[in-house]
Amino acid sequence: MNDDQVERTVDELNRGGRRDGPGIEAFVPFFKAFCNSTRAGIVEQLLGGERCVCELTADVEASQPLVSHHLAVLRGTGFVRMREEGTRTYYSIDWERFDGALDEFRRFVARERGAADASCVCR
């Protein structure tokens, strides 16, 4: 998910109420990060701060190409960023975007729960 897609998703979610457009599927890229044990392990390591690929490879006990593949998926979610320093590449969580996506999901759930409660015909 690129920056434009994230902004559009946030705008859609901030409109409030039920939408004719995307719903929970707007959060698939965010949750996709946690749907693989290698990615989940990488995220867990990044929760502790910035790491280089060689550290992540050792920590999750996976090959460098596999870790690099999963890092690319995580970068695609928009909440993992990379920084190059010399011959090493470092990865970290973009907390602003991570927290923003999580907050948007919480608001979405609260809004949907409220809409479901309000539309109940049993009361």
Image (cartoon, rainbow, N blue to C red):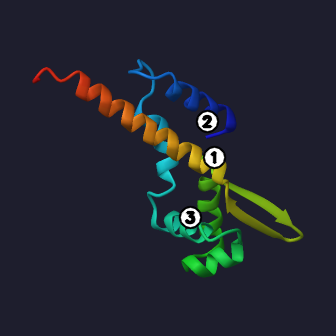
Please state, as top left, top right, bottom left or bottom right, where the N terminus lies in the image: top right
Check disc 2 and report the residue beneath it.
Answer: 6
Q: In front here: 58 or 109?
A: 109
Residue at screen point 26% across, 28% down: 116
Q: Earlier in the sequence, mark 1 or mark 3?
A: 3
Q: Are marks 2 and 1 in contact (CB under 8 Å)?
A: yes
Q: Is residue 59 above or below residue 20?
A: below
Which dot, 1 or 3, sits closer to the camera? 1
Check disc 1 and report the residue beneath it.
Answer: 97
Q: Is residue 29 visible?
A: no
Residue at screen point 44% across, 42% down: 106
Q: Earlier in the sequence, mark 2 or mark 1?
A: 2
Q: Amino acid at mark 3?
A: Val
Q: Amino acid at mark 2?
A: Val
Please state, as top left, top right, bottom left or bottom right, where the C terminus lies in the image: top left
Drawn side of residue 71 relative to residue 22, left or right: right
Which image quarter: residue 122? top left
Tell me if mark 2 has few (under 14), some (14-19) or many (20+) residues whose alpha carbon lies within 10 angstroms of its own. Answer: some
Q: Earlier in the sequence, mark 3 or mark 2?
A: 2
Drawn side of residue 73 relative to residue 115, left or right: right
Quote the CA–CA distance across marks 1 and 3.
14 Å
Check disc 3 and report the residue beneath it.
Answer: 43
Quote the CA–CA distance across marks 3 and 2.
20 Å
Looking at the image, the residue that sits furthest to the right is 86
The picture places residue 86, in percent across and down from the top left corner, at 89, 70
Q: In front here: 94 or 73?
A: 94
Q: Is residue 106 visible?
A: yes
Question: Does dot 1 land on a helix, a strand or a loop?
Answer: helix
Looking at the image, the residue that sits furthest to the top is 20
Tell me if mark 3 has few (under 14), some (14-19) or many (20+) residues whose alpha carbon lies within 10 angstroms of its own. Answer: many
Looking at the image, the residue that sits furthest to the left is 122
